[in-house]
Amino acid sequence: MKIYKYTLAMADEQVIDMPFGAEILSAQMQNEQLCMWALVSPNHRDEAVTLCVVGTGNPFPDARQCKFVATVQDKPFVWHIFVKKG
C-alpha cells in the first residue's frame, strides 16, 4: 500500500484514474492548488473515478448520486469534494 497525491482542477466535475479500491483520505489546499490524498494498492488496475467540486451555496444537482469526501477552505471560498457513485 502507498499514499498517492492527486492534483484536482477547480471544476464542477472531473475524472481521474486511481487504482481500484483506492481509499480517499483527505483533500486540502497545498501551494494554492487543490489536492487529494488516497491510500492505494499500486498493483491494482486503474479505474476512472468521477469527482465533483462544489462551492458553498452553489447548485449541486447530482448530490444524491455522490458520496462526500472532504471540505476544503481556500481563503474566502469553501469547496466540498464528492465522489460520484457508480
Image: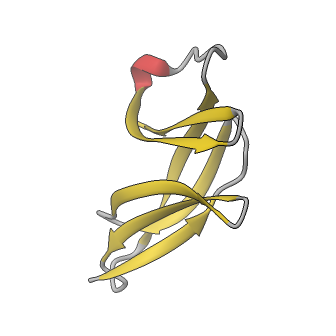
Q: In this view, does 62 lie above or below 8?
A: above
Total label count?
0
Pick the residue in front: 16 or 82: 82
The image quadrant of residue 21 is bottom left
Quadrant of the rendering where the C terminus is positioned: top left
Q: Which residue shows up at 34% across the image and 86% down it? A: 43
Q: In screen coordinates, is 35 left or right of 18?
A: right
Coloured how?
Answer: secondary structure
Q: Which residue shows up at 60% across the image and 33% down it? A: 78
Q: In this view, does 3 lie above or below 13?
A: below
Can residue 86 be seen here? The reply is no
The image quadrant of residue 2 is bottom left
Can residue 44 be seen here? The reply is yes
Q: Which residue shows up at 70% across the image and 41% down it? A: 75
Kindly give the residue lying farthest to the front in the view shown: 75
Q: In screen coordinates, is 50 left or right of 22?
A: right
Residue 34 percent location from the top left of the image: 64, 55
Residue 57 percent location from the top left of the image: 63, 14
Q: Which residue shows up at 66% across the image and 17% down it? A: 58
Pick the residue in front: 6 or 20: 6
Q: In screen coordinates, is 30 left or right of 69?
A: right
Q: Is residue 23 above or below residue 51?
A: below
Residue 67 percent location from the top left of the image: 37, 34
Pick the residue in front: 77 or 86: 77
Quadrant of the rendering where the N terminus is positioned: bottom left
